Amino acid sequence: MKLPGQDAIARQADEHLVTYRVKLPRKLVEHPIRQVAKRLSMALLVLVVTAFIVYADRDGYNDNSDGSLDLLDAFYYATVTLSTTGYGDITPVTDAARLTNIFVITPLRVMFLIILVGTTLEALTERTREEWRLNRWRSTLRDHTVVVGFGTKGRSAIRTVCATGLRKEQVVVVDPSAKAIEAATADGYAGVIGDATRSEVLKRAELQRARQVIIATQRDDTAVLVTLTARQLNRNAKIVAAVREEENAPLLKQSGADAVITSASAAGRLLGLSVLSPAAGMVMEDLIQQGTGLDVVERPVIKAEVGKTPRELDDLVVSVVRGHRVLGYDDRELGTLELTDRLITIVRATPVTQIAPDVRPLRG
């Protein structure tokens, strides 16, 4: 099956050059131009204060050109003094003027230089600090979650995963939109700006060392290409993808996705259920909102539960994961529970409720 727009995506993936950038979350975000403007304003304030101090004591200075000192001469003297140029055409001649230069003008000169030199050094070292942060981030990033697409689906997926105990530092967002990445970093996630169909972009997100990948792109054809690329880079990661059209779900599974969610049909089924039974619709919506009300939790079987049936447990068991199969709680093939089984249960959400990590990705 050929998806609409697949040729355009393929042509884009064949381009030699790619633009991508990694952005790490910052606690305080201030635009660089605003920082420079603030420091320049401070330097200008120091210059103006110095000029008025000199003008107020203008009788203590001598101008070699005409002997008198006006406001323009005061600004001129302040400028050449603070910048340490010092032409010597205007000089303090009285004791009071010289004391003012020692105890007032000199500290202002030092302050002026600190402001300007500090701005210059910060501009020169910003890239070095950023590279150091990126290298440190890459060296410590392991078993993280990569989320491709920071739209409505991607945001909801991240909130659900983080509600189970995943730290924000373990989430990397990939999106071609700079605004989306800015929003992600503002929320505390690391972000990579670029086309996720390119392996170079996914490598920037350290996908080859990721534990799970969530693909929530806007187009189904893009989701297919991202899935193929992600599976090629990481054979062991669990990949979950969302598609709009149900007919494209098998193609996603063939591309390497462990689970495929059809967003349009899932929303439609929830709408239909809510029409037939508003209460049942509310329960289903509560179940898919992790961290509130009732939660669906996957956990391993403990030794005390081995040999029992799902009905004999205190927890409300919905299904049992055995190997690569998901069996219903009343499936005749299930029999009794084994130590290697995993249980899908419904529990009351608490602050410590977490989904136990999967031992292996489920396919099919």
Image (cartoon, rainbow, N blue to C red):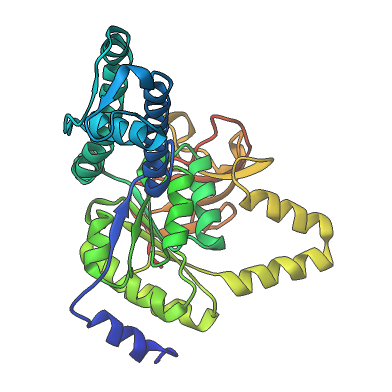
* Quarter of the figure with residue 301: top left
**Residue 325 % position (x, y):** 43, 60
Q: Residue furthest front?
A: 66
Say left or right for 14 vs 256: left
* Quarter of the figure with residue 264: bottom right
Q: Where 156 sits versus 84, above or below?
A: below
* The C terminus - image quarter: bottom left
Residue at image coords 24%, 57%: 204
**Residue 276 % position (x, y):** 83, 67
Q: Is residue 287 visible?
A: yes
Closest to the observer, 271 or 17:
17
**Residue 354 % position (x, y):** 50, 37
Q: Where 222 sits versus 185, above or below?
A: below
Residue at image coords 40%, 21%: 53
Closest to the observer, 67 or 103:
67
Q: Where 66 sits versus 330, above or below?
A: above
Residue at image coords 37%, 25%: 50
Q: Is residue 139 visible?
A: no
Say left or right for 179 vs 361: right
**Residue 176 % position (x, y):** 39, 67
